Amino acid sequence: MKIDALTRTEQFKNFSFVLPAFIIFSVFYIYPFFYTFVLSFHKYDFISESKFIGWANFKEVIFYGKHWWNTVYNGAFITFWALTFQNILAFTLALGVDKATRTGKFYRVIFFLLPVLSEIIIGLLMREFLLSNPGIFNKLLDKLNLSFIAQDWLGRDRALLTAALVHCWKGFGWAFVILLAGLQTIPEQLYEAARIDGASAWQTFLKVTVPLLMPVIALVLVLTILGTMQAFAMILALTRGTGGITEVPVMLIYNHLRGRQVGLACAEGVILGIILIAVSFTMLYISKQIRRRWGVLPR
Amino acid sequence: MYYRAKKIITLILLHTFLISVALSCIFPFMWMINSSLKTETEFRADHGLVMSKRISLENYKQALLGERLWAYFFNSVFYTAITVFFIVIISSLAAYGFSRLDFPGKNIVFFMFLAAMMIPLPAGFVPLYVLLNKIHLVNRTGYVLAMTNMGLSLSIYLLKTFFDQLPHDLEDAARIDGCGRIRIWWNVCLPLVAPALAVVIIFNALNVWNEFVLASLMFTENNLMPLQVGLMEVYNRNIIQHTLIMASLTIGAVPIILLYLRMQKQFIKGLTAGAVVG
């Protein structure tokens, strides 16, 4: 059916299929989306009328907000661990499972258990597990003759690293599943051809596996950045922010909203959103350049 | 012979590595369940690292009735069921509309839904909460509507790709037999995309079930809180009652684990669906 063949009422009847979704979407997504920008230029505390104050919120966040950049640093620290440790672990596991089993179903089911469970449950469970008093994890290390690693895991010195590691522990299964699915789409003939040409295992990995997996790897990296910089509930449950030591950006936004500093929270949200978009576009651009240089990308 | 031996040794080493990582995933949960079955005194003696000979269900009773975890649990069931129901109906209607029906501005509207999936909105809950506050919807209705919206974009996108793949013949046949749009959508097309609906249901159910931020902002009354917020409350009220907390966490985790083991294929598809789109 062509549009010009339809009468007005027909068009409206067709549109009515989309209408409920469109209304909810407009009210709860589009309006709040633009409202963020409006609020970020205002001072509003739920009680008195909102007041336009220009760039004051942004100035406060960017220039006087040591606190804010500290949370961004914490988020970036956790993201760094997620990008390196979590993804390398996931990639190693995916390669191992791909080599050792045919479908990898058993390992996939177990590794994916953690991403399924809620952040609050994982955070609270790990808090109970690691808390220095009664110190179950340290007791366990003691039994395994590893007591030299034992320490106050959620204390001020270690809490941020612990938060990063628990985050990796919760997230690696997700990266593993995506990477394994990617590995399983690489046709067997390519490996065979490489073998016949006398390529070593390392050469095959570098010249066949990695280039063909590059789009999937880039996707995992971007989604890791987006997910980790916005992580919040797990860290809240695990550490309570440890007096700012493990405070992440979204936690600060959340606390500012609770403290009725709506404009400030919105300005922070806008800034974080811009940072995230910039970083993920840079990542996608770099991965495209790499693929082009290796001649994997068509065109 | 040499190659064979080398291959077997590699396999053994690989499986040892894989199984040790798998154990690290499972052990905390075994410890959690084991500790939840102990009394607080027993737990203080062995830290839950020894299998208990005696099983005490006292913690579960205290968690469910004393801490009213059953109420949090049923709140979560309620929010999840209603939200998923709304999402399935609304998103499948819209996806069918985008896939099969024509109206002016269709592509622009669809593009908006797509863009919503791509743009990260780290503080989206701030204006949402302010808005709900202004229109006096800081209650269950507001929460369900806001959560419905969160699931719409991805569900519409997923279902539309499935509707696009359906052959037109069946619908034509139904139309010739006198079916209207609604009946074609409900009786012909929806049953055909049942596998995609399963993925949409799991993805959204888990999303609502695990949601914490918005719920913790909106529900300050104890009898409205969903499970995730309730668990934080139970924890804060009983910080030194370790076995009670373990029982509460077990109640929160085990139903999901069982459901996951039963339907792991849909779970994995549902949770990685977001990634495939990006």
Image (cartoon, rainbow, N blue to C red):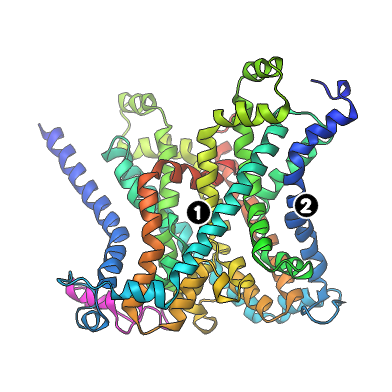
Q: Quadrant of the C terminus of chain B?
A: top right
A79 above or below A7?
A: below
Question: In this figure, which residue is indicated by the disc labeled 2?
Answer: A26
Which chain is disc 1 placed on?
B
Question: In this figure, which residue is indicated by the disc labeled 1?
Answer: B206
Q: Is B258 on the left or on the right of B15, as rendered?
A: right
Number of callouts in the render? 2
Quarter holding residue A183: top left
Query: Which residue corresponds to the image point at 64% horizontal and 27% vertical from the top-left?
Result: B164
B173 above or below A15?
A: above
Q: Is A168 on the left or on the right of B8, as rendered?
A: right
Front-lying residue, A49 or B92: B92
* Three-letter amino acid code at the position of disc 2: Ser
Percent across and percent down for residue A211 are 47, 37
Front-lying residue, A219 or A135: A135
Within the magenta stretch, is there residue B160?
Answer: no
Quarter holding residue B219: bottom right
Q: Is A237 on the left or on the right of A29, as rendered?
A: left
Front-lying residue, B179 or B246: B179
Percent across and percent down for residue B175 are 70, 18
* Three-letter amino acid code at the position of disc 1: Leu
Q: CA distance from mark 1 to mark 2?
A: 24 Å
Query: Which residue corresponds to the image point at 23% horizontal and 84% vertical from the top-left?
Result: B41
Q: Secondary structure at mark 2?
A: helix
Query: Which residue corresponds to the image point at 41% horizontal and 64% vertical from the top-left?
Result: B252
Highlighted magenta segment, given as a residue range = A130-158
Which chain is disc 2 placed on?
A
Q: Which dot marks residue B227?
A: none
| Residue A128 visible in rendering | no
